């Protein structure tokens, strides 16, 4: 696939299809590809979080939240006015 803004949506849709078909590893891969193209892609971040929680990979959840926090610190203008709950216990 050519990597451009449009393809983040393709990766996201591929992740949703994989998740729906009980292919969590593939789903996580596709969602992370979408995030790599757009680190602000909250919907994909939330899907990865959901997969990590289902796998009880709490270290992975912490790493995901920390990476998002680093992104907010380095590029706060990209997140102004956004609210989301990443781990189910804290809001950003």
Image (cartoon, rainbow, N blue to C red):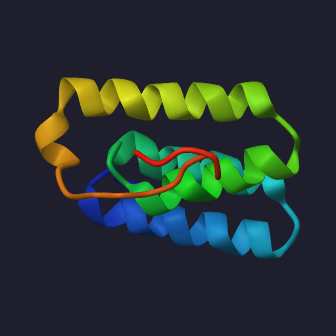
Residue 14 in picture, x, y percent from top left? 60, 68
Can residue 25 be seen in the rendering of this structure? no
Kindly indicate the quadrant of the structure image that contains residue 70: top left
Residue 4 in picture, x, y percent from top left? 27, 54
| Left or right: 46 in relation to 84 | right
* Quarter containing the C terminus: top left
Who's the residue at 69% across and 74% down the image? Answer: 17
The residue at the far left in this view is 77
Front residue of 76/35: it is 76
Residue 42 in picture, x, y percent from top left? 42, 56
Who's the residue at 65% across and 71% down the image? Answer: 16
Residue 53 in picture, x, y percent from top left? 79, 47
Front residue of 89/24: it is 89
Q: In this view, does 54 lie above or below 68?
A: below
Can residue 73 be seen in the rendering of this structure? yes
Front residue of 71/9: it is 71
| Left or right: 77 in relation to 10 | left
Q: How many marks?
A: 0
Who's the residue at 52% across and 54% down the image? Answer: 85
* Quarter containing the N terminus: bottom left
Who's the residue at 21% across and 24% down the image? Answer: 74
| Left or right: 43 in relation to 55 | left
| Left or right: 62 in relation to 10 | right
Q: In this view, does 57 lie above or below 5?
A: above
Front residue of 64/83: it is 83
């Amino acid at each position: 696939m050519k990597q451009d803004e449009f393809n983040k949506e393709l990766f996201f849709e591929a992740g949703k299809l994989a998740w729906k078909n009980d292919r969590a590893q593939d789903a996580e891969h596709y969602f992370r590809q979408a995030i790599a193209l757009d680190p602000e892609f909250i919907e994909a971040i939330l899907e990865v979080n959901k997969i990590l929680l289902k796998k009880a990979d709490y270290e992975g959840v912490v790493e995901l939240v920390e990476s998002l926090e680093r992104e907010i610190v380095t590029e706060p203008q990209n997140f102004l006015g956004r609210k989301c709950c990443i781990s189910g216990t804290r809001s950003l």
